[in-house]
Structures are given as C-alpha cells and as structure tokens.
Amino acid sequence: MPVPCIPQQIIPPQISHFVPFVANDVLRYENRPLVDKSRGRDHIPALMRCFPNESCPWLSGDWKSLIHPDGALYLYNDNRRAFTEANTDETTFRLIDECVNGLYDLARAESASLEADDIELVVQLPQLEVEGAQVSCQYYFVDHAARTLFWLHDNDQATVNIFSGLQGVVDPSHIRYALESEYWTHCERYPNYKMDRVKLLRELREVVMHASAEIITTDMSSSPFDADELSRILELINHLQENAQENDFPHSTCIIARFMHYFYRSKFFDFCGLPCARLDADRSVYEDDNVFHPLTSSLSLALDAMLFWAPQVHLKGIRSVWVDECINVPRWKDFNKNIMAEWTGITIYVRIKSPFRFIT
C-alpha cells in the first residue's frame, strides 16, 4: 500500500533572549546579498513615471525602506522609531518586528520611559541557519538628547565590544566618550534624526580649529587627523554651513557624524577629562613595565653598534607611534614617510656606487 506524502512543516525560529550590541557591530557591510543574473526586465512600460522599490515586498505596517547616502537600503518604523537592515528575508523581518514589540513591552514592564521623540531603537538578528532554532535578538537604544546608547539589560561585553580592550576604564565620564563615539556611528548609519546642524557645525569647527592649532605649535598632538586633513575638514565645514538650516537631505548629517566619531573615539583612548589624561601623543598613561625586549638586551648592543645604532633609532620611532597598543595615524604616516625616504636614499646610493650599473 503506498505511503501518503505528508508535507514537511516548517518550524519557525523563536526568540530566546535579548542581547545588547553597539552601532559599530551592525551587519551592513557583511554578508551582502548578491544580484541574481537570471532575473531581469527587457522593456520599460509606456508612461512609466513611478518607480517603487520592490526589493522588500513583505514590508507591512509602519515599516518603510530608506536609502542611505552611500547606497545602502535599510528599514525604518516611524511609529516605533526603530531601525533594522534590509539585507534580510521575510521570516527574519517578522521576528524583528516581534523583537521591537517585545523590547517596548519590556521597557513598560520596567517603568522605563521610552516614548520621547529623541529615543530610537536598532534591532538585528543573526543569520538563521537551523529551522526552529532559538535565536538571540541584538539591540540598542539611542538617546539623542544625551548623545549616547543604552540598553534594558546589563552589557557584560563592554570591554571587547565598546572599549576595544582598553584597560583601566572605570570612570563613568570616561565611558561616556566611548558611548558617544558609538552614538555618532549610529547617526552616520541611520541619518534620520533632525539635528541642530548649525550648533553641531559650530562645535565641530571649534574641535577642528583647536586640533589644527595643536599640530601647528607642537609635534605631540594626539589629533586623529594631520594638518592637511584638518584643513580639508574646515573647507567641508564651510560648505556644510550653506545648507545647515535644511534637514531634507541626510548627507550633511552623515559627514558631521563621521568626523565627530573620530574625535570622540580619540578622546576615549586618551582618557580625556581624567587626571591621567594623555596630553602628549607619545606618552603612555600606564606605568612602565620593564619587559625584556630583544633590541634592549646586552647581546643586541653589539649588533646595534655594527649597524650604527639604527635599530635603536627605529625602535624609538615605533614606540612613539605605537603607544598603549594604539596607533596615532598622523604620526604613523610621518614615520612611514621617513622610512621610505631613508630607503630611497640608500637605494640611490647603492645604485651609484655599484659596479654593476644598468641603463634604465
């Protein structure tokens, strides 16, 4: 007797718990979907003047798709002020919608007031690989008034996810700079909030002018940009001020947020506002550890002398660039420029003195 064919039931995944994450971990640039070359349109209908985005046909409710200035498509719920990425499928989207409702229900249960217009939510789900599996919902809230990220749960992975492994982070005023740098990353990724651009441009201009003055007057500046880059940033600020009153275009918000992120990240790594703040780019904020180094041993002294102490010179240069396991980008560029100039000089000298010269 033939066995009847019973269709296999697809078991939808379930949300197991909520996990805090940060704006820098949003999976926008990873696992991008690819174009299906087998699909296409051979003709354009007559009188076609409406061009809807049909890439997310399963969108429903208050969700809508938006386009970032860099071309990325993301989703926004205007009623719940919630964001998520568009590189997802219908099943994942339904789960994300449930996560948004669940997080606001949890906030109400804990008497947390999140109804203000300057509060936003970002939700993300990892890729679903097993049917019926328990998945975790990653999320963070944004407070635009306080310029920070926050969560409804304790963030137990802050040292890795937010502090980038920086040691000695204790003071809340210090943590604030790390969270504000993540806040600006969020504003760059999701530039929907109507900011006071005039005030922000004044603040950014002051920061850039102070960094420029530091670089001009001292070679110990901890600015994340060199003099030429700061000059170009000031030019951009002058152009941005022309449209500072208009909030119809998100491009200006992305530009301001990107620069603010770099400056506040630098403040965090320099322990800004604390008694132990790094005031010189080549100074460590930690106690010196007398760890053995091959170039400082007695055996290396003879080699150093044979090489006219060049290894010690380069070691000192590297230590002035690589401080507390952090690289100061402008100083690193200068270090590489000097190394290349030195090698170019040696190469030219060898070619001139070599008996085996070739005509090029």
Image (cartoon, grey):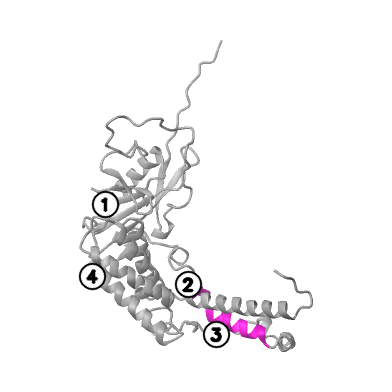
Separation of disc 2 and disc 3 at Cα? 16 Å
- The answer to whether mark 4 and mark 3 are in CB contact below 8 A is no
Question: Can you tell which quarter of the image residue 146 is in?
Answer: bottom left
Judge the density around disc 4: few (<14), some (14-19), many (≥20) Cα neighbours within 10 Å.
few
Residue for badge 2: 166
Marks 1, 3: nearer the viewer: 1
Q: Secondary structure at mark 3?
A: loop
Q: In the figure, is residue 172 to the left or right of 111? A: right
Separation of disc 1 and disc 2 at Cα? 32 Å
Q: Secondary structure at mark 4?
A: helix
Residue for badge 4: 199
- The answer to whether mark 2 and mark 3 are in CB contact below 8 A is no
Residue 227 appearing in the image: yes
Residue for badge 3: 288
Judge the density around disc 2: few (<14), some (14-19), many (≥20) Cα neighbours within 10 Å.
some
- Residue 323 on the magenta segment: yes
Q: Residue drawn at (41%, 47%), measured in percent from left and top?
A: 16
Q: Residue 310 appears at what percent x and percent y? A: 66, 85
Region of the chain picked out in magenta, as a range? 309-329
